[in-house]
Amino acid sequence: MKKLTFVRLVVLFSFLPLSIINAQPVKTSALLNESSSQPTAVDSLKKKAVRINALMSDYHALRELNGSVLVAKNGKIIFEKGFGKANFEWGIKNDPNTKFRIGSLTKQFTATLIMQLVEKGSVDLHAPISQYLTYYRKDIADKVTIHQLLNHTSGIPSYTSKENFRNKVSRNSYQVESFIQQHCSDDLAFEPGSKFQYSNSGYFILGAIIEVVTGETFAESLDKHILLPLKMHDTGYDNGQEILTNKAQGYEKLLEGYQHADYLDMSIPYAAGSMYSTTRDLLKWDNALHEGTVVSTPLQKKMYEDTSDRNYGYGWMIEHLPAEKFGKAKSIVKHGGGINGFNAFITRVIEDKYLVIILNNAGGAPMTAMTEGILNILYNKPVAPAQQHPMYALFQQYKKGGIKALEQQQELRKQQGESISERHLNSLGYLLISSKRLGDAINIFTFNTRIHPTSANAYDSLAEAYYLNEQHDKAIEFYQTSLSFDASNDNAKQMIEKISVL
């Protein structure tokens, strides 16, 4: 079946010694949209810090944030605080020193290592892969350039998009060359340079190129050329074996409570996503980038250029804030990261030297909404209140009033020309399955087919719930209904065949 799941996943006032650490939660109703009289710069910052704390505390209360947040301007901390637990078993709290896996934030470090090699003349951005990796399949290696790997226009499919990746690949350990040959060497999805398609394979290959050119492992290059010079002692390559003090455990959020995230062998994310860090170390990183101490300013600017049709540079997503809303045009460079049990987001406003970092260790978190809320506070714009993910809100309604409550919600939405999202109901059903509540899952999937009566996927999901509940006649009936709306549903065909011989 095709599961339509929600994203669990691709993001500073000078010389003011102001830091709010472990600030107490405050009520938000009167704070979020108050006007700023700004009697002094310090008073203004204090108010903004209180409002940021209120907003993030609300997200935490809704179970949408469990991690650490840091906001700074000109390298000076405005706000920092840990929310929730780094380890639920031991009741250890998150704080500014907690180490989190940062997933694809790794890509900006990989891109920087490449640009350092460009600066030395050891790598040519417009050279093909074949100039550096002799073992990569030549028909592709001769066509794809370093530039295209960096900005995701290579056409090389991402290994994380493979259908069997989670079940058959993610738990195994690989050597770099072996992994590239087995999982990063598929046929091109499109002609290199013709369009954008996010590819973890491209950054895995970049890590291999760094190793070949330097004669060092990726982890050694990272330490030697970035982390040690910047004194980022709480950041590194997570090999999954080293004992790391203050390291957060990764969890996934359930409908009620949490569970440990699935195991992932850390040889697999590699240069595309295997790093860990803290909010304070990422502040050091931001400072170094502004100071131009990591790579020369011209090359760093090149990393921020929109070189694809998706506003992506080299390891950074690019966004431009309109002058009519912010007084003058501003450039944002940002990036998100998602890896089993963790989410990360870093946002840097280049002209104003604002920095927002959010690190989370409990599965999916609304990083974009939280970041937008913080930026709106910093720029004295209206702030939307914290909201619970619609799927969890639907569960709370179902928990209180059953399907009748959802029917009432659907009626209200119909009056507004809307409908409860098929995707949210589908995701809720699968979380109920994972919680071993098959009867409730069947109720939700059945309701989904009623309000989305022509959805092949809704019927496919209902059929799966009946199959898991050992109601095979019902399962076959709804797999057949799914096929009536989508004759190409191979999963339904295979399941009917499988059930028929039981």
Image (cartoon, rainbow, N blue to C red):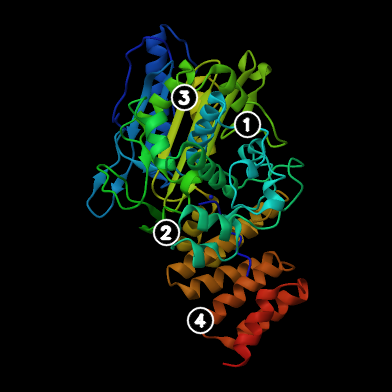
Residue 164 rendering spot, x and y as whole percentages: 56, 66
Distance of mark 2 from mark 4, alpha carbons? 21 Å
The structure residue drawn at horizontal position 73% and vertical position 44%, both measured from the top left corner, is 192
Horizontally, residue 178 falls left or right of residue 481, namely left
> What's the mark number on residue 355?
3
Pair 2/3: label in front:
3
Of the two numbered discs 1 and 2 in the rendering, the one whose residue sits closer to the viewer: 1
First reached walking from the N terminus: tag 2 or tag 3: 2
Decide: marks 3, 1 in contact (CB < 8 A)?
no
Report, in whole angstroms, how far the alpha carbon at label 3 lies from the one at label 1. Answer: 31 Å
Q: Secondary structure at mark 2?
A: loop
Say whether disc 3 or disc 4 marks the residue closer to the N-terminus.
Answer: 3
Q: Which residue is mark 4?
A: 469
Distance between the alpha carbons at the discs numbered 1 and 2: 47 Å
Label 4: element kind: loop
Coordinates of residue 424 in the picture (x, y in percent): 58, 57
Q: Earlier in the sequence, mark 3 or mark 1?
A: 1
Label 2, label 3: how far apart the Cα atoms are = 31 Å
Residue name at image x 42 percent, y 22 percent: 72
Q: Residue at x 44, y 26 (%)?
A: 30
3D distance between C-alphas at marks 3 and 4: 50 Å
* Quarter of image, res 495: bottom right
Identity of the residue furthest to the top in this view: 39
Where in the figure is residue 340, as x and y percent of width and height? 44, 53
Count residues near mark 1 (Cα–Cα under 10 Å), then give few for <14, some for 14-19, many for 20+: some
501, 218: nearer the viewer: 218
- Give the residue pinned by disc 1: 124
Kind of residue sitting beneath label 1: Asp
Specify the quadrant of the image occupied by residue 64. Answer: top left
Q: Is residue 38 above or below residue 345?
A: above
Give the SS element for disc 3: strand
The residue under label 2 is: 254
